[in-house]
Image (tube, rainbow, N blue to C red):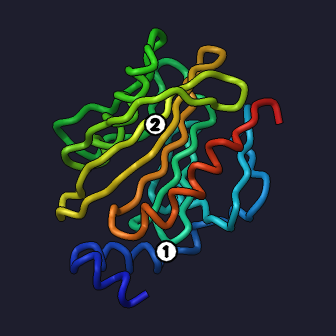
Amino acid sequence: MTSRIRNLGAAGAIVLLGLLAGCATATDAPAGAYKVGAAYQVTLGREWSDVSAMLGVHERGMRVLSVDGPLLNRLYLSEGLAPGESMVHSTVKEKPTPTVKADFTPQETVEFVADSVAALGYLKVESANLRPGRFGDTDGVMFDLTGTTSEGLDVRGEGMTAVRGGKLYVILFLAPTEHYFGDGQAEAESIMRSARFGA
């Protein structure tokens, strides 16, 4: 753990230690079937922790999981966001909280996710490599994200979105580019492929 803290820099280490001290608010997400609300489930290949409360996630229908801690990797799972609902609450004064629109195109769903990540304080957030995907039995779009933290740490993301029954479903894996993204990418992709509605 010491080497991980050293790699984050002083500011990141202080935040990380504070989050570790509050680990009592995290709950287990064991390997195996994991229900994301009432609509669908995914299969976790290893044990994760639900860190939604640690991050102060109060958005209806959102869960955030992590393996190594929320500064090192995050997996966002939406239960299904209706028009007007949000994936995150903006922490940046100049950026309004992005909300779902009823007439989103596939590209606009990706822009919504990128704008949501930027609203959390990440800088230079860009999406790329949009490609067809399957979210359970529903056509969706997969994409990559890049950005940096305010301390200058490069982050990468890979995600998938789909609209089903008038709601937006999102799975997004986000982690520092160095080590943590590559370490968790295969597991994140497996989780995305495992999504099953009506489970």
In what element is the residue under mark 1? Answer: loop
Q: Residue furthest bottom?
A: 2
> Does residue 156 lie above or below 113 as drawn?
below
Under tag 2, what secondary structure? loop
Q: Which amino acid type corresponds to the residue marked 2 in the rendered image?
A: Met
Please give the residue where the numbered disc 1 appears in the rendered image.
22
Residue, disc 2: 87
Looking at the rendered structure, which numbered label has been put on residue 13?
Answer: none
Using the image, determine if residue 31 lies above or below residue 199: below
Q: Is residue 185 above or below residue 46?
A: above
Occupied quadrant, residue 95: top left
Q: Quadrant of the C terminus?
A: top right
From the top left corner, tell me how far across and down residue 62 is, in percent.
Answer: 55, 42
Q: Nearer the viewer, residue 72 or 128?
A: 128
Q: Residue at the location (40% across, 59% down)?
A: 175
Query: Residue lying farthest right?
Result: 199
